[in-house]
Image (spheres, grey):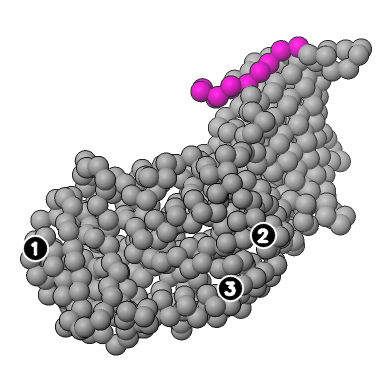
């Protein structure tokens, strides 16, 4: 395609007008197909999380006019045709929403597909083909009557090429992926050519701010947490100057300190820094203790008493994220899960925010970003489709924490996981989590969030001891984070859990103090928290890394 800087542009916009959530989570539900025909020019398709479908024409000798590009919609199919009356070659740039299906036809123009493609059928006569997609999750088959002029594949990834029997009468040159039958697949590409020009395969790195992520992305996040690397700031993250250091459990093995930038810690009175702990305070019966003041808490850091300057619960906003396990093992519970998520919305306080994520099709999906808009949350929950798939639960929990909560250190954060806890590491089925569970437990002590598993005992129907082992692991994660596990016979039997969880949330305090030792050198500091009242039960992490 001609360089964009030398093209003459004209733009037209289309609003796709379908449920983006359904298309991302389940392509069989209201799956829209975008069909692009451009006989005289090339086509560059960019997959984007935005729900807007955008079409832009770029002419070489004159601006592309609206008469050159026709768009029509027939049910769940949007058809884009570029057929200039004067034969002017016009390249098309098309922005397609994530989760939509794609069909592209050209004669000699280059076809360039960029992003996470759910499914695409591509036809060209002699044009070049450039595919920039996540190849660890994308299948491809390219058939050309003649061998392409050149073939470039990404380093470190395997593809098979060569002549094969297309049918009984002829052979074609074929390029195929080398993914195994048990690989976790998101996309599929089928390309047909007569004499393809250059074929270029490039690996697409899924952006951190996309609402769909693959489970293997959790490994890098987990390493960042264990090494103390700061989260990448986003527009929705709080100002770094208000972000205190949070407490965390000590690792089983020493970790070489990695000192992040000052954006990870608050600056007070010149360079004096504050530490904020998340503490749960109840009586021996588990009832929350409300109204505690700073003077009620006693904090000891490395044997030295500290002066608590702030302690708050009801007056401190809570950021809650719900992770819904929509894997195959919970498929019978789908309607009840929608109802349960809607009930959690009602637990929010006036200042609280809630995010909804899903493990669906073996992948992590952002259903709703962190928001205080109750109506929007309820509407989003109602659209959850009945999907299923593999269960890399541990990977997905890391991604759920990293999505928004990790960028809010020092705030009251909670991750609610509604699941039977059966990661495919336990069931030994396809697509298990890649991260090591012991490393996840260690990281749970580093996370700035309490983990609250809503553990579904309905997983016992599988037998084989999966459910018992899953519960033991989920309890370890909850304990390491300072949270608590809530058992439920099934998703239909969550009614008793709602008041228990609401009570638990009311018992969570943010306790802050200025450490006497202001040398933040990356070393581990042991912290104990007590309340000067009889019969009080305190749950808090055992300390933090002074980074």
- Place of residue 202 in the rendered image (x, y in percent of width and height, measured from the top left): 57, 30
521 vs 391, left or right, is: left
State which mark lies toward you, 3 or 1: 3
**Mark number displayed over residue 21:** 2
Q: Which residue: 22% across, 59% down?
A: 543
Residue range in magenta is: 153-163
**How far from the left and from the top, in percent, is residue 443?**
35, 51
> Tag 2's secondary structure?
helix
User: CA–CA distance between discs 2 and 1?
Assistant: 52 Å
What residue did someone put label 1 on? 303
Give the distance between the C-alpha atoms of the residues marked 2 and 3, in whole angstroms.
25 Å
Tell me, yes or no, whether the highlighted magenta stretch contains residue 69: no
Q: Which mark is residue 494?
A: 3
Is 468 situated left or right of 538 in this image?
Answer: right
Q: Earlier in the sequence, mark 2 or mark 1?
A: 2
In this orientation, does residue 347 appear?
Answer: yes
Q: Position of residue 161 (x, y in %)?
A: 68, 16
On screen, residue 517 above or below 316: above
């Amino acid at each position: 395609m001609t360089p964009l800087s030398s093209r003459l542009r004209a733009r037209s916009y289309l609003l796709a007008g379908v449920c983006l959530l359904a298309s991302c989570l389940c392509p069989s539900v209201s799956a829209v197909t975008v069909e692009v025909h451009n006989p005289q020019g090339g086509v560059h398709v960019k997959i984007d999380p935005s729900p807007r479908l955008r079409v832009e024409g770029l002419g070489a000798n004159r601006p592309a006019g609206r008469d050159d590009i026709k768009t029509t919609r027939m049910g769940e199919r949007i058809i884009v045709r570029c057929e200039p009356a004067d034969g002017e070659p016009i390249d098309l740039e098309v922005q397609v929403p994530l989760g939509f299906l794609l069909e592209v036809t050209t004669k000699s123009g280059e076809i360039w597909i960029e992003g996470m493609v759910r499914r695409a059928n591509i036809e060209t006569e002699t044009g070049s083909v450039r595919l920039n997609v996540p190849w660890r999750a994308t299948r491809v088959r390219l058939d050309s009557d003649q061998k392409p002029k050149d073939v470039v594949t990404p380093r470190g990834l395997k593809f098979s090429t060569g002549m094969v029997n297309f049918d009984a009468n002829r052979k074609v040159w074929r390029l195929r992926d080398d993914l195994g039958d048990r690989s976790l697949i998101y996309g599929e590409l089928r390309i047909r050519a007569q004499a393809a020009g250059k074929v270029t395969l490039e690996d697409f790195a899924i952006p951190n701010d996309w609402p769909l992520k693959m489970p293997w992305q959790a490994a890098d996040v987990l390493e960042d947490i264990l090494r103390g690397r700061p989260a990448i700031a986003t527009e929705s993250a709080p100002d770094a100057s208000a972000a205190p250091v949070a407490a965390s459990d000590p690792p089983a093995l020493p970790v070489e300190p990695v000192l992040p930038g000052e954006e990870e810690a608050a600056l007070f009175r010149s360079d004096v820094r504050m530490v904020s702990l998340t503490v749960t305070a109840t009586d021996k019966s588990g009832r929350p203790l409300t109204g505690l003041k700073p003077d009620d808490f006693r904090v000891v850091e490395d044997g030295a008493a500290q002066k608590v300057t702030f302690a708050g619960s009801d007056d401190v906003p809570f950021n809650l994220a719900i992770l819904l396990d929509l894997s195959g093992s919970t498929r019978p519970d789908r309607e009840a899960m929608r109802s349960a998520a809607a009930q959690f919305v009602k637990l929010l306080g006036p200042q609280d925010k809630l995010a909804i994520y899903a493990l669906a099709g073996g992948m992590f999906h952002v259903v709703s970003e962190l928001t205080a808009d109750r109506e929007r949350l309820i509407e989003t929950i109602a659209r959850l489709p009945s999907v299923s798939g593999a269960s890399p639960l541990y990977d997905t929990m890391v991604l759920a924490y990293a999505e928004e909560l990790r960028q809010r250190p020092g705030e009251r954060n909670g991750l609610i996981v509604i699941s039977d806890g059966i990661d495919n590491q336990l069931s030994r089925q396809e697509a298990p989590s890649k991260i090591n569970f012991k490393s996840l437990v260690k990281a749970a002590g580093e996370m700035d969030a309490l983990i609250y598993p809503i553990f579904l005992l309905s997983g016992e129907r599988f037998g084989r001891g999966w459910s018992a082992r899953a519960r033991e692991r989920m309890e370890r994660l909850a304990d390491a984070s300072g949270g608590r596990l809530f058992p439920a016979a099934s998703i239909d039997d969550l009614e008793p859990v709602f008041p228990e969880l609401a009570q638990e949330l009311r018992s969570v305090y943010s306790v802050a103090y200025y450490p006497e030792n202001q040398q933040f050198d990356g070393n581990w500091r042991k912290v104990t928290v007590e309340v000067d009242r009889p019969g009080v039960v305190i749950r808090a992490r055992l300390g933090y890394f002074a980074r």
